[in-house]
Image (cartoon, grey):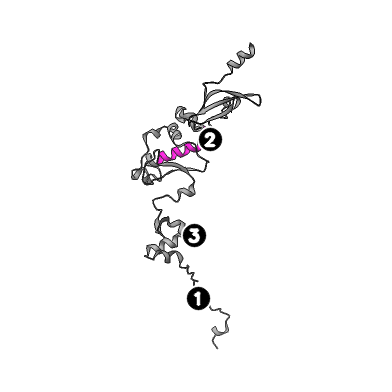
């Protein structure tokens, strides 16, 4: 009898762990009960009771499906400690758009770039953006003239961000629209030289392919006072 009571008390049927809802018991694995669960994506999977209770299994994992926590339900104060890198990006975003004393305000708030009111809350911002893949990632707007809002923002590396600015130049090359920066790198010409040539009206092929000429600075040789040719007879 005691064994049956213990089994009923330990039942997880109907409980939810992350994206998983427990359907029924399927047996035992390594002395732990094995449960069949249904994920929010509709797929079913098996999970051990210890993995579910400890939060180590929260999604089916099928086709890369993972559990993403809804940070909007958490207090903002605790989130800034748990996610300091994301919080710094959130603060910097607000400074760029809202603080007129900020050094780069003129490039953001000064030219009309705004932040969606929902992102006044860091918790909502984190819920929409999700955690950074790594601390070196930074927030990027897909449309550099668009606002900070869901659908126009993502986490990218600084190298990727440098390719998406208002100064980025796209050109038609062999029937395709490509970054001039990429062509410059493939032809071995420095970006400054290529830009200067195009600004002077050079054709694209010539601007990229013509070798750079290096001129040696001519210096006058100073005559030595000991040179006998400098002495008068």
Q: What residue range appears in magenta?
A: 82-95
Front tag of 1 and 2: 2
The quadrant the C terminus occupies is bottom right
First of labels 2, 3 by sequence position: 2
Which class describes the residues within 10 Å of circle 3: few (<14), some (14-19), or many (20+)? few
Foreground mark, 1 or 3?
A: 3
Q: Which residue is under mark 3?
A: 186
Task: List the single residue furthest toward the bottom.
Answer: 233
Q: Is residue 209 above or below residue 158?
A: below
Q: Is residue 172 left or right of residue 158?
A: left
Whole-number angstrom distance, CA of label 1 to CA of label 2: 76 Å
Q: Residue furthest left?
A: 112
* Residue beneath the point at 58% across and 28% down: 47
Q: Which residue was labeled with disc 2?
A: 62
Q: Position of residue 165 (x, y in %)?
A: 41, 50
Residue 128 on the magenta segment: no
The alpha-carbon separation of the residues under discs 1 and 3 comes to 40 Å
- Residue 79 is situated, as x and y percent measured from the top left of the image, at 49, 31
Q: Residues within 10 Å of mark 2 (few under 14, many from 20)?
A: few
Mark 1: secondary structure: loop
Do residues under tags 1 and 3 come within 8 Å of each other at their CB atoms? Answer: no
Viewer-nearest residue: 198 or 106: 198
* Residue at the farthest right position: 30
Give the percent coordinates (x, y) of residue 222: 53, 76
Q: Quadrant of the N terminus?
A: top right
Tag 2's secondary structure?
A: helix
According to the picture, the residue beneath numbered tag 1 turns out to be: 220
Q: Residue at x 42, y 55 (%)?
A: 178
Provide residue 8's location: percent of width, then percent of height.
58, 15
10 Å neighbourhood of mark 1: few (<14), some, or many (≥20)?
A: few
Residue that sits furthest to the top in the current view: 1
- Total numbered circles: 3
């Amino acid at each position: 009898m005691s064994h049956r009571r213990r089994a009923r008390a330990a039942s997880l049927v109907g409980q939810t762990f992350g994206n998983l809802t427990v359907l029924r018991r399927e047996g035992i694995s390594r002395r732990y009960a094995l449960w069949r669960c249904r994920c929010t994506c509709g797929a079913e999977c098996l999970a051990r009771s210890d993995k579910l209770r400890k939060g180590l299994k929260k999604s089916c994992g099928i086709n890369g499906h993972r559990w993403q926590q809804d940070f909007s339900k958490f207090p903002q104060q605790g989130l800034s400690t748990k996610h300091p890198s994301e919080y710094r990006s959130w603060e910097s975003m607000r400074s760029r758009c809202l603080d007129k004393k900020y050094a780069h305000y003129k490039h953001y708030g000064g030219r009309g770039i705004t932040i969606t009111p929902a992102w006044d809350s860091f918790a909502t911002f984190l819920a929409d953006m999700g955690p950074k893949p790594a601390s070196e990632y930074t927030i990027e707007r897909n449309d550099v003239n668009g606002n900070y809002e869901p659908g126009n923002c993502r986490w990218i590396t600084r190298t990727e961000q440098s390719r998406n600015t208002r100064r980025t130049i796209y050109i038609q090359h062999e029937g395709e629209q490509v970054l001039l920066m990429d062509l410059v790198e493939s032809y071995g010409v420095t970006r400054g030289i290529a830009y200067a040539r195009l600004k002077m009206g050079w054709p694209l092929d010539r601007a990229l392919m013509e070798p750079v000429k290096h001129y040696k600075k001519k210096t006058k040789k100073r005559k030595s006072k000991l040179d006998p040719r400098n002495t008068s007879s």
